[in-house]
Image: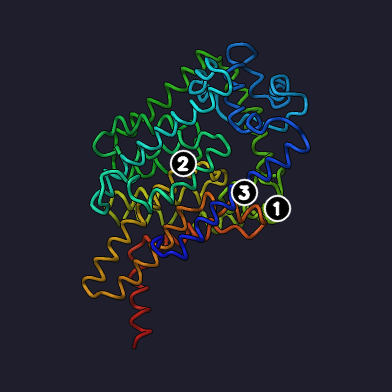
């Protein structure tokens, strides 16, 4: 797809537009409130929380009114709204940031988590996609590298933890057969953002991967026990009683028509972003989530293809969970880019075998998966313009085209059209 010069130019224009819109947004924010934008990025949450661990009251992290006081004390009285949304176990990951000043801690965090993301993508490709690539590393494949720029830009612009969670998920999915205990550790660590792992237990159960399940449970328990031992039981109590309800309030009530909502990929948030609220937004979300869950179980049951199962899981996760941002979607971009490359290679084989109908189907699937890989930038850009959310439509279409029934119906349709 990206070999087409016109389409490639459109993609570059989209990336440039995305960066420009974000820079303009930061410029406007600075003009109205002159605080250096580098201190208003999301990384400030991690750094200030690490500082509170060693210098302040741990419980204040989980209470928004107390937490914002720490941020304003550090960065200025006009510091914009930020909130803490992570479980106490995440504090174990960010505590070392206390060792560095902010301007050092930020690149250290991004570079170290990007290294995990880089290795996760390489491990997943080596395990599932190597026969469809000309190099051992997907990063040396131009189409893959260009498509994965989308989540990389999102994480850099928002200084988020998407490299970390995507790297853990990719490693967990890549290693689940050959090194299931290590895969389980990665999956257990992913509980710092539990909404991203909601379907993984079903996959492991379908595959009867008891070692990975045991390891994931053991790791999750270790994180909870360690965080209770270090930070106290009250930290978890405050997280459940204060932070979670506040986060739910933000998701369902606040932020309408803002950049905050435009950054999310789900049908529920997309509906809110264009003014649909309450039960109607949940109904719209369910219209995508329920079919996605059914299609996922169909693929799990019908297919023994480990890459297809993992790809289905990741796509369905970003349809079903209502709370996932574009910077969380690094794993989605990697998975979809690799599956698009696989389908593109199969399309070439179909053309060589003079199977034009199958080639047409594979060409369509390739294009959809490449578009899905670009969603961290594409969906956010369109969301900022208050254009109807496209992510659930694109992702559900990808899921449908993963089923064997879809190919059969498509080929029959082409035959009938030619008749």
CA gap, disc 3 and disc 2: 34 Å
**Residue 120 placement, left or right of 240:** left
Residue 11 x, y percent position in the rendering: 50, 57
CA gap, disc 2 and disc 1: 25 Å
- Few, some or many residues within 10 Å of mark 3 (<14, 14–19, 20+): few
Q: Earlier in the sequence, mark 3 or mark 2?
A: 3
Callout in the foreground (3, 2):
3
Label 2 element class? loop
The residue that disc 3 covers is 20
User: Residue pushed farthest left?
Assistant: 353
Residue visible at 67% across and 52% down in the picture: 273
Label 1 element class? loop
Position above or below: 48 against 401: above
CA gap, disc 1 and disc 3: 30 Å
Position above or below: 27 against 233: below
Residue 239 x, y percent position in the rendering: 61, 26
Residue visible at 41% across and 30% down in the picture: 188
Callout in the foreground (1, 3):
3
Report the coloring of the rendering: rainbow
Residue 223 x, y percent position in the rendering: 45, 22
Q: Earlier in the sequence, mark 1 or mark 3?
A: 3
**Residue 34 placement, left or right of 303:** right
The residue that disc 1 covers is 277
Residue visible at 45% across and 51% down in the picture: 316
Per the rendering, the mark at residue 198 is: 2
């Amino acid at each position: 797809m990206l070999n087409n010069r016109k389409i490639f130019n459109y993609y570059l224009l989209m990336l440039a537009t995305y960066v420009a819109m974000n820079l303009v947004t930061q410029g406007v924010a600075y003009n109205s409130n002159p605080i250096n934008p580098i201190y208003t990025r999301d990384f400030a949450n991690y750094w200030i929380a690490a500082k509170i661990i060693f210098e302040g009251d741990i419980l204040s992290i989980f209470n928004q009114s107390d937490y914002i006081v720490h941020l304003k004390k550090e960065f200025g009285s006009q510091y914009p709204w930020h909130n803490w949304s992570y479980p106490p176990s995440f504090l174990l990951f960010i505590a070392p940031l206390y060792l560095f000043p902010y301007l050092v801690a930020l690149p250290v965090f991004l570079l170290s988590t990007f290294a995990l993301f880089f290795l996760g993508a390489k491990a997943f490709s080596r395990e599932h996609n190597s026969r469809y690539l000309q190099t051992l590393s997907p990063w040396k494949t131009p189409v893959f590298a260009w498509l994965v720029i989308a989540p990389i830009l999102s994480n850099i612009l928002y200084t988020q933890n998407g490299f970390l969670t995507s790297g853990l998920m990719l490693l967990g999915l890549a290693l689940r057969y050959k090194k299931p205990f290590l895969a389980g550790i990665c999956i257990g660590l992913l509980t710092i953002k539990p909404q991203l792992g909601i379907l993984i237990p079903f996959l492991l159960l379908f595959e009867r991967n008891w070692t990975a399940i045991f390891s994931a449970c053991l790791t999750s328990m270790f994180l909870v026990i360690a965080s209770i031992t270090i930070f106290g039981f009250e930290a978890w109590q405050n997280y459940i009683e204060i932070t979670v309800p506040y986060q739910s309030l933000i998701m369902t009530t606040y932020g309408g028509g803002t950049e905050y909502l435009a950054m999310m990929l789900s049908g529920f948030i997309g509906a809110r972003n264009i003014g649909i609220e309450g039960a109607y937004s949940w109904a719209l979300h369910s219209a995508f989530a329920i079919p996605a869950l059914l299609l996922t179980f169909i693929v799990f049951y019908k297919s023994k293809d480990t890459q297809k199962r993992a790809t289905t899981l990741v796509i369905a996760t970003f349809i079903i969970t209502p709370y996932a941002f574009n910077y969380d979607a690094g794993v989605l971009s990697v998975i979809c880019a690799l599956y698009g490359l696989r389908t593109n290679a199969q399309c070439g084989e179909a053309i060589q075998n003079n199977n034009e109908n199958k080639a047409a189907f594979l060409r369509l699937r390739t294009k959809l998966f490449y578009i899905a890989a670009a969603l961290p930038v594409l969906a956010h850009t369109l969301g900022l313009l208050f254009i109807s959310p496209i992510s659930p439509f694109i992702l559900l279409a990808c899921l449908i085209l993963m089923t064997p029934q879809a190919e059969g119906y498509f080929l029959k349709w082409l035959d009938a059209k030619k008749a």
